[in-house]
Image: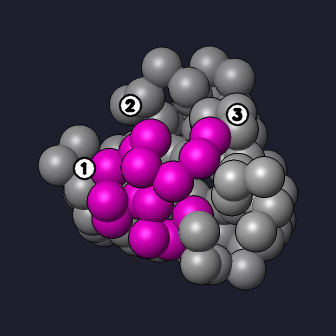
Amino acid sequence: MAKQASARHILVKTQEECEALKQQIEGGTAFADLAKEHSQCPSGKSGGDLGSFGPGRMVAEFDAVVFSAPVNEVQGPVKTQFGYHLLEVTSRTD
């Protein structure tokens, strides 16, 4: 069975906004609520949920975090060509 991960993310334009949102999450604000309100990605409507995917399906910077970071721990800011992401791996099979 190939590696699979499920993740959710929030995409914003600036590193500052990304860091401010991360502080709100650490302060107890729900990730999904912030995704719905702030994410520039269509996935924001579903709380930032990207579903399940294998390596190589996402941009390299994203993949590197998703397949190495601890599960259920918010990571970021992660810079890609799209902007700055907060991302959280919700499950992963190695």
For marks 2 and 1, the one nearer the N-term is 2
User: 24 or 13, which lies in front?
Assistant: 13
User: 82 or 3, which lies in front?
Assistant: 3
Determine whether 58 is above or below 15 in the image: above
Disc 3 crowd, CA 10 A, few/some/many (<14, 14-19, 20+): few
Please give left or right for residue 9 compared with residue 84 in the image.
Answer: right
Q: Residue at x 76, y 68 (%)?
A: 94
Q: Can residue 5 be seen in this view?
A: no
User: 51 or 42, which lies in front?
Assistant: 51
Q: Which amino acid, by three-letter code, is at mark 1?
A: Gly
What residue is disc 1 on? 83
What residue is disc 2 on? 40
Q: Residue at x 25, y 56 (%)?
A: 80
What residue is disc 3 on? 51
Q: Give the range drawn in magenta.
A: 53-66
Q: Do the residues labelled 2 and 1 touch (CB within 8 Å)?
A: yes
The quarter of the picture where residue 72 lies is: bottom right
Q: Is residue 40 visible?
A: yes
The quarter of the picture where residue 90 lies is: bottom right
Report how far apart the C-alphas of labels 3 and 1 lie in the structure: 20 Å
Residue 6, position in %: x, y? Answer: 72, 47
Q: Which of marks 3 and 1 is in front?
A: 3
Q: Which amino acid, by three-letter code, is at mark 3?
A: Gly
For marks 2 and 3, the one nearer the N-term is 2
